[in-house]
């Protein structure tokens, strides 16, 4: 099971990795299985409309084919045939292409846009024999819908080989396992090989596995790490190493680290910048950034104002010392005073409101972006999903940046992840976890001045986004009617902000971004 981390569009580099694995391991393996679209990375999106892209794919496939000697190899790739593009998998052996299978079920929901690019393969099972075993091939969504696997079983397959580019969310693994267990009850063993690594807003967890015909998981690769894992079949027995499953918090944390690391590495940024406020969100982002890139590639910027509490500065400095992160302190007071003076004639007779608060956030955003321009380091934003949902963030202020690490992480999950990280080693000061959260843009301000308690807010967001419940249905679940209506109004009103937000890592079943495609202008209540 070759659980690899390709880069989308880097066809030659991906092919070199695939060929190296084949040449290194084909002499002591009968079959090497690479994931769905391993040659191009997933999803290649509109690169699939470019002829030059397909020329590179075909040239790379010829090299992969030539590299196979005494071992069978399965590689996922796009294929053009009769002016149609297919999501394909080729079977190579002894320098020949023995079969080319086309994915039969093309997903077009959630994060998947495959119907835009790929035609449906014919409903014909792909069966091949190795060492007396009859194996059947399918690709990702083929597993989730009726038909393709049924045909493999009817054709006498003993082992199903399913190659996948299955994006992570924290509910996904049990669903995959339940599917494979369902097929095991019909007498078929399964080899499930999944992609790993980050690609823009998606992150792939790997966790490739092998399950015998009795439903026992007898091999499983680790999460969010490239892994070449051997699975042995002997008679009806299956043997392999089973990596222990991680807790929900451990999985999410590794997903965030992996997604950030790959976004920075694959896009060639030297490092990252972030504003460190002494609050929980920036503290968690700092920890994730250091774990992903190392302290030397992370630079924190403290930007205090007249409203910044002394304990915020103390806690931020304490974390910087613990994690040995370089930092800069830039007071926003001179710029804030200058802007207030400039705007005073226009603001005459008008009360102080969120305008003055947003000015502070926008000054901070401007300073971070200036440092980014000068150093080449990318700015990480620190807003979480709860704030993104209700617009509790400043457009062109704390929303300014290149990547939003916590974009799909609810505030309650932020606290859980911070405690998880501190259990590994205490890097976030305890006071950051226990004091009331505040934007510190006005005197004695706390988040709950304008938002429901985060436990209630997050539950309402989850009901609305993941379960598609209406206001009345959410209220029936026991949540306060006033809070429900207020939160849903804010979610709808702030769609325009989210369209201008940076990308961030999807970790839930429904994330803002690829999952969420609502109109900015809408009369629907």
Image (spheres, grey):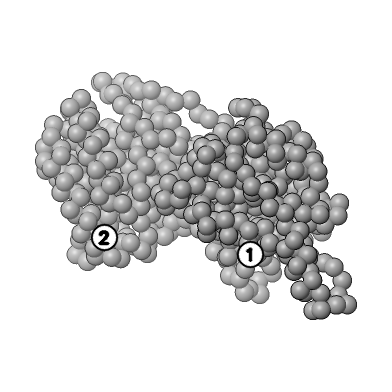
Report which residue position mark 1 lands on.
396
Closest to the observer, 197 or 341: 341
**Occupied quadrant, residue 522:** bottom right
Residue at x 30% of width, y 58% of height? 120
Quarter placement of the C terminus: bottom right
Q: Nearer the viewer, mark 2 or mark 1?
A: 1
238 left or right, relative to 475: left
**Which element is circle 1 on?**
loop
- Left or right position of 361 against 107: right
Q: Position of residue 96 (x, y in %)?
A: 11, 43
* Visible residue check, residue 155: no
Q: Residues within 10 Å of mark 1 (few under 14, many from 20)?
A: some
Horizontal and vertical percent position of residue 255 = 51, 41
Residue 335 is at least partly visible in this image: yes
Rendered view: 1 above or below 195: above
Q: Which residue is mark 2?
A: 53
Residue at position x 22%, y 30% from top?
24
Decide which of 100, 403 is in the foreground and name it: 403
Kindly identify the residue that appears in the image at 57 percent across and 56 percent down: 371
């Amino acid at each position: 099971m070759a659980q690899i981390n390709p880069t989308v569009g880097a066809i030659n580099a991906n092919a070199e990795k695939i060929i190296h694995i084949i040449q290194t391991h084909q002499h002591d393996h009968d079959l090497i299985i690479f994931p769905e679209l391993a040659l191009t990375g997933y999803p290649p999106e509109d690169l699939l409309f470019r002829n030059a892209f397909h020329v590179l794919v075909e040239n790379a496939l010829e090299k992969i084919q030539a590299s196979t000697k005494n071992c069978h190899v399965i590689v996922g790739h796009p294929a053009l045939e009769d002016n149609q593009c297919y999501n394909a998998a080729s079977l190579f052996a002894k320098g020949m292409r023995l079969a080319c299978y086309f994915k039969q079920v093309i997903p077009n929901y959630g994060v998947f846009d495959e119907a835009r690019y790929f035609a449906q393969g014919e409903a014909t099972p792909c069966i091949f024999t190795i060492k007396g075993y009859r194996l059947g091939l399918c690709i990702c969504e083929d597993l989730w819908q009726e038909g393709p696997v049924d045909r493999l079983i009817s054709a006498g397959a003993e082992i199903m080989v399913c190659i996948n580019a299955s994006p992570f969310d924290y509910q996904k693994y049990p669903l995959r396992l339940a599917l494979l267990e369902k097929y095991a009850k019909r007498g078929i063993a399964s080899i499930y090989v999944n992609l790993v690594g980050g690609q823009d807003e998606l992150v792939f967890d790997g966790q490739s596995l092998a399950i015998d015909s009795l439903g026992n998981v007898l091999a499983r690769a680790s999460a969010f790490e490239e892994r070449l894992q051997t699975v042995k079949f002997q008679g009806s027995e299956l043997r392999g190493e089973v990596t222990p499953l991680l807790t929900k918090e451990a999985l999410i944390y590794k997903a965030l680290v992996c997604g950030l690391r790959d976004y920075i590495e694959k896009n060639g940024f030297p490092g990252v910048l972030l504003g460190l406020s002494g609050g929980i969100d920036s503290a968690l982002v700092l920890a994730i950034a250091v774990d992903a890139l190392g302290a030397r590639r992370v630079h924190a910027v403290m930007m205090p104002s007249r409203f910044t509490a002394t304990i915020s500065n103390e806690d931020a400095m304490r974390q910087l010392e613990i994690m040995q992160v370089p930092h800069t302190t830039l007071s926003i007071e001179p710029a804030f005073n200058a802007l207030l003076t400039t705007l005073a004639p226009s603001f005459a007779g008008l009360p102080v409101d969120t305008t003055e608060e947003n000015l502070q956030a926008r000054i901070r955003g401007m300073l971070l972006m200036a440092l980014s321009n000068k150093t080449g380091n990318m700015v990480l934003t620190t807003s979480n999903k709860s704030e993104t949902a209700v617009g509790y963030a400043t457009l062109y202020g704390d929303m300014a940046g290149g990547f939003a690490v916590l974009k799909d992480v609810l505030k309650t999950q932020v606290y859980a992840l911070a405690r998880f990280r501190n259990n590994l080693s205490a890097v976030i000061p305890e006071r950051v976890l226990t004091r009331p959260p505040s934007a510190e843009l006005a005197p004695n301000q706390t988040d709950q001045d304008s938002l429901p308690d985060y436990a209630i807010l997050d539950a309402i967001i989850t009901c609305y986004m993941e379960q598609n419940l209406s206001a009345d249905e959410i209220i029936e679940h026991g949540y306060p009617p006033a809070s429900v209506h207020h939160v849903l109004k804010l979610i709808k009103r702030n769609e325009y902000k989210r369209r201008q937000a940076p990308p961030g890592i999807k970790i839930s079943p429904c994330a803002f971004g690829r999952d969420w495609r609502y109109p900015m202008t809408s009369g629907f209540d």
